[in-house]
Image: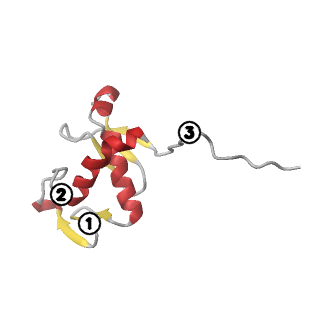
């Protein structure tokens, strides 16, 4: 006799997060392989306060949807290429960053 398990009453998040050497002005980075890298010199408390991981999870979602992609030279947002050499990466006015900054706090509340 078999039984059916219902959905668990909690959310499971299996996003791999790794601490790495990074430039001092970088707190975290979402990778196209679904992982998140965080600056090893920033305390976990500081990462939480800045909502770094929830912000990077928005970028992971954007990549899964096919809206965001990047390589060493360009960031592609909804089919439009933005040269990395001509942008201030992480700036709040970039379209993919606008969404991430707007949603980052909401990820923690779900």
Q: Residue at the location (28% across, 29% down)?
A: 46
Label 3–label 2 contact, CB within 8 A: no
- Of residues 95 and 86, the one nearer the viewer is 95
Marks 1 and 2, the one that precedes in the sequence: 1
Marks 1 and 3, the one that precedes in the sequence: 3
Residue 86, given in percent of the width and then of the height, sits at 10, 61
Q: Residue at the location (62% across, 42% down)?
A: 8
Q: Nearer the viewer, mark 1 or mark 3?
A: 3
- In this view, which residue lies farthest toward the right? 1
Q: Residue at the location (32% across, 26% down)?
A: 45
Marks 3 and 2, the one that precedes in the sequence: 3
Q: Residue 61, located in which quarter of the rendered image? A: bottom left
Q: Is residue 13 left or right of residue 39?
A: right
Q: How many marks?
A: 3
Residue 1, given in percent of the width and then of the height, sits at 89, 49
Residue under pointer 3: 10
Q: Residue 81, located in which quarter of the rendered image? A: bottom left
Q: Residue 106, located in which quarter of the rendered image? A: top left
Residue under pointer 1: 77
User: Circle 3 — which element?
Assistant: loop
Q: Residues within 10 Å of mark 1 (few under 14, many from 20)?
A: some
Q: Nearer the viewer, mark 3 or mark 2?
A: 3
């Amino acid at each position: 006799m078999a039984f059916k398990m219902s959905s668990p009453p909690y959310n499971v998040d299996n996003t791999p997060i790794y601490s790495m050497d990074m430039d001092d002005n970088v707190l975290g980075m979402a990778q196209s392989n679904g992982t998140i890298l965080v600056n090893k010199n920033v305390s976990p408390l500081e990462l939480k306060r800045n909502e770094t991981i929830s912000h990077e999870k928005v970028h992971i979602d954007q990549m899964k949807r096919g809206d965001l992609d990047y390589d060493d030279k360009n960031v592609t947002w909804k089919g439009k290429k933005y040269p990395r050499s001509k942008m201030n990466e992480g700036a709040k006015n970039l379209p993919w960053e606008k969404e991430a900054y707007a949603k980052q706090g909401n990820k923690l509340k779900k």
